[in-house]
Amino acid sequence: MALAMSAFLTGCVEGQFFYPDRIDYGSPRALGIESTDVHIAGPENNTLHAWWLPAVGPAKGSVLHLHGNAANVSNHLPLVAWLPRAGWHVLMLDYRGFGRSQGKPSLNGVVADARAALAWMRAQRHMPIVVLGQSLGGATALRAVAGGSAGVKLVIVDAAFASYRGIARDALGVLGWAAAPALLALPGTPNDPVTAAASLGVPLFVLHGTRDGVIPLHHGKALFAAAREPKQWLEVEGGDHLDALAREPVRRQLLAAMERAVAAQ
């Protein structure tokens, strides 16, 4: 039975990182936000869907938002709906297999999708760029920017994990040794977010809630410790998974960091 469970986990463990759907959870218009549908030519002939939310008034820069592992951009919209009014364009990307984007998600595939979105922003001259990644999106953001940072002035990582096998081990720990072979199916150290953080060539802002029950705080601390200066750490006292951006003091600190990063270049 244990061997059968191990074989099953090896085949499906990467799929447990993704819970996409095509449900409409709400529109920018319902929140009084202007938006445009964008279709990006992604890797492997996939067409990726995104929302472009233009800044209200003169733009300070553009934000690429990389969401977490569930649902689609419409579900994550409230997390960044405040940014256009603060003077920032926002590109909200749905990875392959999420929402109206084609394809099937994979851990390496979503990194390639993020790089395609960055390439689109550069081609459209939507710079300077701030990359904001949350949860799985934070891990994806680090890898995407470490592979090519042209135009990117700051990476913000909210409630992300440091390694694929590490977060899976946290989740599957109760299965004991039976889970070990399954973890080998995940990207290893060379492709881990913490490895990307160590090689990142742009400023990094890491925030993490002290009561995050999905991705423990030690993951955020590991990412911050690995990164080179300049970097900034924000420990959100009492914060649960992905509730930091609902807090006005956190928003103010992020906006200040974004403006500093753009002004420094």
Image (cartoon, rainbow, N blue to C red):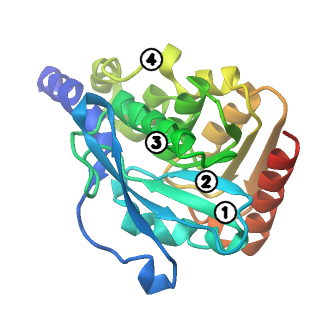
Residue drawn 22% across the image and 39% down it: 104
What's the residue type where badge 3 is placed?
A: Ala
Closest to the observer: 219 or 41? 41
What is the secondary structure assignment of the residue under circle 3? Answer: helix
Q: CA distance from mark 4 to mark 2?
A: 29 Å
Question: Between disc 4 and disc 1, whose residue precedes?
Answer: 1
Q: Residues within 10 Å of mark 4 (few under 14, many from 20)?
A: some
**In the rendering, at what x and y percent does residue 112 appear?**
40, 31
Label 2 sits on residue: 63
In front of the other: label 3 or label 4? 3
- The answer to whether residue 39 shows anywhere in this view is yes
Label 1 sits on residue: 88
Closest to the observer: 160 or 141? 141
Question: Between disc 4 and disc 2, whose residue precedes?
Answer: 2
Q: Is residue 197 above or below residue 238?
A: above
What's the residue type where badge 1 is placed?
A: Trp
Residue drawn 75% across the image and 58% down it: 254
Label 3 sits on residue: 117
